[in-house]
Amino acid sequence: MDLAVEVENLTKRFGDFVAVNEVSFSVAEGEVFGFLGPNGSGKSTTIRILCGLLSPSSGHARVAGLDVWRDAERIRQRIGYMPQFFSLYDDLTVAENIEFYAGLYQVPPALALARQSELAEVLELGPVLDRLARTLSTGWRQRLALATSILHRPPLLFLDEPTSGVDPLTRRLFWEVIGDLAHEGITVFVTTHVMDEAEHCTRLAMMHYGRLIAEGTPEEMRTEHVQTMVEVQAHPIWPVLQALEKAPEVVEVALFGDAVHAELRCDLNDAEARVERKLQTAGVAYERVVAVTPSMEDVFVSLARRWERPTAAGADR
Amino acid sequence: MNYRRLLAVARTESIHNLRDVRSLFVIVVLPVVLLLLYGYGINYDLRNVPFAVQDLERTELSRSLIQHLVSSGYFQLRQVIHDQRQIAESLDRAAVVFVLVIPPDMGRRLGAGRPAKVQVLVDGADTTRASVAVGYIEGALLAFSGKLGAEYLARQGLSAAGGLDVRPVVLYNADLKSVRFIVPGLMAILLTLLSGLLTSTCIVREREWGSFETLVTSPALPPEILIGKILPYVVIAFADTLLSIGAGALIFGVVPVGSRLLLLFTSFLYLLASLAIGIFFSTIMRTQRLAILTTTLVTLVPTIQLSGFAFPIRSQPLVLQVISNFIPATHYLIIIRSLYLKGADLLVLWPRVLALLVFTVVLVTVAARRFRKQL
Ligand SMILES: Nc1ncnc2c1ncn2[C@@H]1O[C@H](COP(=O)(O)OP(=O)(O)O)[C@@H](O)[C@H]1O
Ligand SMILES: [Mg+2]
């Protein structure tokens, strides 16, 4: 399978600050590649380098086999890019924005019109075509931005947090559209800080403080990086958290909604019993202890903590 | 170069301008304001200039002199002064622009073939008005003495061979029309203001909006973006140039004496140079405010200060005279003034036209080079 994106030891510095730190990964054609990480972890910076907007400080990045900086102009027609922040024209109508894009990407006018109505159908933009972009709410602006980024049918699509700030229905619609695009053979590179959206991706990479801390399929992420996960429900919850934090067999504890998720070093079979025993010894009240499949957020928290405490992480392995 | 992409940029840029109040103001209101300034200039052109007279001679000759002034249509007699002290008072009140004092021996001296000293006291506070007024009076008095001289000689049965020597006082503006001087100056100011204000924001604005990001990732090449962005302004600025030339001709009867083609060509060059300066600052500045401010400081202020619009260049310190050579407006002003007033041609003007051409080429090149598709 051909590689759509190849990144080797990519580093981006802003002055002394290292926004992207020795990152390497690759994306095969046809993948829905999820680029995860909290705010400020370097996702947008990486995507901007891949789109030829920023120069890499060191390392290499190739898109469709072409160097993203030296061959930037040759790559542009082959990629679509939806920036994190709305970057269309507020004083143009939705249709005028689409027409502008059709012009920039040389989509023939007749074809552009056909695609416009097709996209208006899929993204439900029909009723707002003649409205100024300024008057649209975030969800609609994001729909417009998505529509313009795929107007010219690029084989590779970069979406930077397409679902941030949109309502749940639009969010679902977006992932449906992304699924459809992938089905048509379009490679999608999508970033998000909402870990649970990762389930929609075929493969993932996790960023933390500019470093790539994990890579793999959602399944691999859950099974390889986190060993055993139990959920404890209790009222109050804080004593549970404190009691488990001190326990030697516990790798990580974190609040998860109104429960506590604890990652353990031991086998799944006796994990629940161990935690119960631990809590009883400590004299902490609890309601229920159950083994759970770790969510992507659990995976991230677990990985992130290990990276934040390099010495502890070393001891753990 | 791809025209589809270029036109997409140009079309979008045009829509921005049509929907932006500030741009519309600059495009539509500015020329109107300019027309009003023309009107103001016309006032300088002086019809019915109020004046007072102190006639110390009181002969038929002195009365015919006063009559000559009034019948010209330029002057209006407001007051006849009998007391010396009234002169200053009358000027102070600004009731009159000047006071004409006819000496008691005017007729005698003229009869003897000697010069007569007619005194003209002008309110110098409003320099523009005053200088125009003085020019008018001089012209009127010269015409009068010319007529007088001819009549006198005729009465004496002599030929006009040894007659009065009447020299024109106001050069290049023989019919004493100050609009002739003001129209070209305002044209330069208009072009500078318009081009600078419009283009200085067109790139930096995209950065502020965030739309620069999508523009940069698009396949549009830098020259396509740059030309696409400038194109609407070239059309607008040229239309406004034609408008001001037309307004000057139709409303105020000021038409270039020299080649109209050269006028259009040099105006076009100059607006390109001004647009390039605006675009240049738009690419290096990070906020719209800063871009507008810098462009105005760099183009408009020197245009007014140094280019001889407000002050003649020759009355300025040498350093400023040297600096003014590096300002496109200086050359443009000299060219269009020459075309409007003297009817000079390319044979005379070529160094100025060449300078303007060099400026335009250099500025457009610098702006294009500085423009990068980078955040
Ligand atoms: N142009 C820039 N100059 C300086 N710092 C920057 C710049 N762009 C991004 N950063 C910093 O780099 C870090 C990573 O930013 P970003 O890539 O936008 O993160 P993410 O998209 O994952 O939220 C942040 O701390 C941000 O402040
Ligand atoms: Mg981001």
Image (spheres, coloured by chain):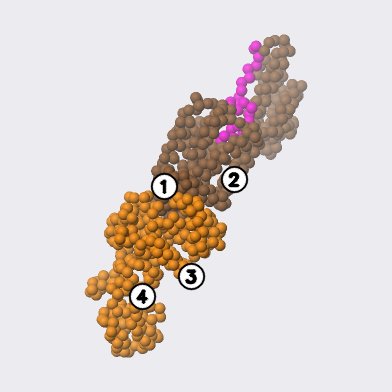
Chain colours: A orange, B brown
Q: Disc 4 marks which amino acid? A: Ser
- In contact (CB < 8 Å): disc 4 and disc 2: no
Q: Which residues are magenta?
A: B161-185
- Residue A62 is left or right of residue B94, and the answer is left
**Does label 4 lie on the same chain as label 3?**
yes
* Three-letter amino acid code of the residue under disc 1: Leu
Beta carbon of the mark 1 residue lies under 8 A of ligand 1: no
Residue corresponding to mark 4:
A295
Q: Is residue A75 left or right of residue A133?
A: left
Q: Which residue is mark 3?
A: A169
The 10 Å Cα crowd at callout 3, few under 14, some 14 to 19, many 20 or more, is: few
Residue under disc 1 on the same chain as residue under disc 2: yes
Q: Is residue A192 visible?
A: yes
Q: Which mark is residue A173?
A: none
Could you confirm whether marks 1 and 4 are on the same chain?
A: no
Label placed on residue B28 = 2
Expressed as whole percent of the image width and height from the top left, the position of residue A72 reads: 36, 51
Q: Residues within 10 Å of mark 4 (few under 14, many from 20)?
A: many
